[in-house]
Image (cartoon, rainbow, N blue to C red):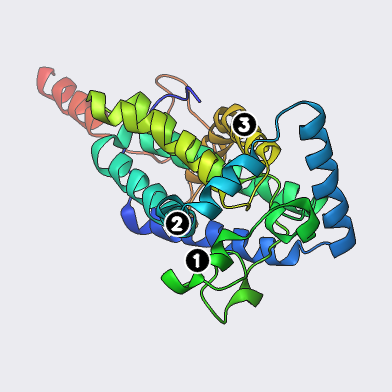
Amino acid sequence: MPYTATRHRPRWWTELTLLAVVYAAYSAGRLLARGDVNTAVDHGMAILRAEKALLLNAEHPLNRLFTHTPALGIPADFAYASLHYLVTPVVLVWLFRRRPARYRAARTWLMLSTLLGLVGFTLVPTCPPRLLDAGQGFVDTMAQYSSYGWWGGQASAPRGMGAMTNQYAAMPSLHVGWALWCGVMLWRHGRTPLMKALGVAYPLLTTLVVMGTANHYFFDAVAGCAVMGVGALLTRPALRLADRVRTRLSAAPSASQSPIVSAGCETSAGERIPGQRTTSAGADDSTTAAAR
């Protein structure tokens, strides 16, 4: 995402409005992308079979670890339910205040990737591991430890608000995608070793959390990273298009501007419009009269 920095600091109120509109569109689109349950289960089972065939099925051992060790499972549930709501906005605000030259490209990358995630939710509704048949060996840690948090048995939604979330919007994992975006921003623009270390640790930790809590498959996490990659590739063209549109709109003549009387016509050097009086001509005449 190597787009050159913006020339001016964006206005915070326009940025806040833009981000709110995009997130509202994302949330509404996520709800509207509900797919058939049987299709979602088929997709989940297909992913699980593919991972087992490739020996990439890390969800089972992680889920057993979190299920049998509350000291890991409970913090993981809190992390899954809250960190993406906290860390992502904090990194955005940090970029806005401390790296305004890089903010616009970073924000565009995040928004494009988020909207691309809706395509995955719509085309590939996927049943997460925790909602598969119990015979598959997964335990919903969010339900197991629900008494410790604000969530119930329907993902990370607060109790009584399960209808406000689409539990089959699992492919790609935007938890992982957003965490990767935060990690890249911290690594690229952080100036201390601690910031860079957090940039590496946060997306890795998020990947372990989403698998251990049985909310996502490993391939969901890979798809989340892929979506962010596509968003990064589209950022530069998107910004160029936005700049061209802004330039054309600012160059358009305003209705308040007075019309040009000459309508584009020009006179040649020394030519006068009939009846036109000029100061220089009057001065020449008086000089000639005085000479006589």
Give above or below for 111 relative to 29. Answer: above
Sequence order check: which comes first, mark 2 or mark 1? 2
SS type, badge 3: helix
Sequence order check: which comes first, mark 1 or mark 3? 1
Give above or below for 201 relative to 32. Answer: above
User: Residue at point 62% right, 45% down?
Assistant: 173
Give above or below for 29 relative to 177. Answer: below
**Can I make out residue 264 in this image?**
yes
Amino acid type, callout 3: Leu
Amino acid type, callout 1: Tyr
User: Residue at point 62% right, 60% down?
Assistant: 140
Could you tell whether 193 is left or right of 270 in the image? left
User: Residue at point 61% right, 40% down?
Assistant: 61
CB under 8 Å between discs 2 and 1: yes
Q: Position of residue 80 (x, y in %)?
A: 49, 54
Q: Which residue is mark 1?
A: 145
Q: Position of residue 9 (x, y in %)?
A: 30, 41
User: Number of labelled discs?
Assistant: 3
- Tag of residue 70: 2
SS type, badge 1: loop
CB under 8 Å between discs 3 and 2: no
As measured in the structure, the alpha-carbon distance from the residue carrying label 1 to the one carrying label 3 is: 40 Å
Crowding around mark 1 (Cα neighbors within 10 Å: few <14, some 14 to 19, many 20+) is: some
- Tag of residue 234: 3
As measured in the structure, the alpha-carbon distance from the residue carrying label 2 to the one carrying label 1 is: 8 Å
Observer-nearest of 11 and 275:
11
- Front tag of 3 and 2: 2
As measured in the structure, the alpha-carbon distance from the residue carrying label 3 to the one carrying label 2 is: 42 Å
Observer-nearest of 206 and 7:
206
- Front tag of 1 and 3: 1
Crowding around mark 3 (Cα neighbors within 10 Å: few <14, some 14 to 19, many 20+) is: some
